Image (cartoon, helix red, strand yellow):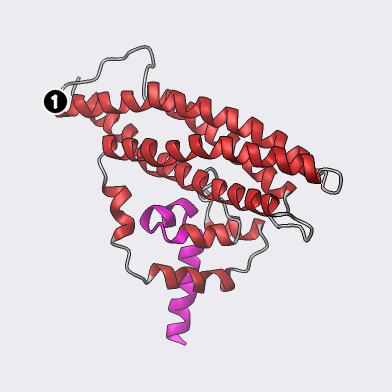
Amino acid sequence: MYKEEIANKRNKDLAEKKVKEFVVENFKTAKLFEKYGIDYCCNGNRPLKDSLSEKNIEVDIFIPELEKILGGNNNEDKIFSSMDLVSLSQYIVNTHHKYVKEAIPAIEAHLDKVVNAHSKNHPEIINIRHEFSLLSAEMLAHMDKEEKILFPLIKYLVDSKKYNEAPKSAGYGTVKNPIRKMEQEHQSAGSEMEIIRNLSNGFKIPDDACTTYTVTYKELEEFEKDLFKHIHLENNILFPKAIELENELTNLK
């Protein structure tokens, strides 16, 4: 009976915890959230119980799977949280920005082929092509702003700490302003991706799909996973640390 009470309290504590906190502490949990279609990046500030309720997932079913992951070795998953801001920014550019820039033209070309060959029987593919065009344009502009404005600003904050200097405003007021804008764009990109997921019925490949159709849906699913990880690294690790650093440096004035 005592063990059961402890287990119930443990489940309640986990259910109250924010989704993003699980992923920050152990990125292996991201795969579990993806499995159940739970957004851990844009809507990661929500308690787990709310996200489960929205998806009609029983807490008693989800928690045991979660605990299996939490009980495993998590040393490698702490790497991102321990990286310095400049290194993490560079990792995001070299890994996620690079992937997006390479993936977009390939996916667009495949979508065009699928539209031409299958839109008569699958009119939803036309809307998927349209939504992906919107998402692509949005992502490319977003990444350009990060690389030219936000990430250099974060490096400036890091350099200011290195020389024990209070940062000077350069028209942005505070790093919170461009970060807020980037978070809004993350939310928009996540919403676009959700539309694509819904239109494709969770990237379910039709019975009459050709090879290109199959590849395209797998590419879109991979794009979604990369997008979630990309947003997670920024919203839940990079941005909070940058704000914390700026607050620390402000006290030097």
The part of the image, by quadrant, that contains residue 253 is top left
- Depth order, front residue of 119/80: 119
Residue 160 pos. (x, y %):
20, 24
Residue 148 pos. (x, y %):
39, 21
Instruction: Please count the marks in the image.
Output: 1
Left or right placement of residue 220 versus residue 142 in this view: right
> Does the stretch in magenta take in 77?
no
Left or right placement of residue 159 versus residue 46 in this view: left
Residue 166 pos. (x, y %):
20, 21
- Depth order, front residue of 224/49: 224
Observer able to see residue 214: yes
Question: Which secondary structure, mark 1?
Answer: loop
- Depth order, front residue of 246/231: 231
In the rendered image, the residue lying farthest to the right is 120
> Does the stretch in magenta take in 13?
yes
- Depth order, front residue of 18/39: 39
What residue is rendered at 39% in x and 26% in y? 147
Residue 19 pos. (x, y %):
49, 54
Left or right placement of residue 30 versus residue 131 in this view: left
Magenta region, residue range:
1-29
Amino acid type of the residue tagged 1 in the rendering? Asn
Residue with the mark numbered 1: 164
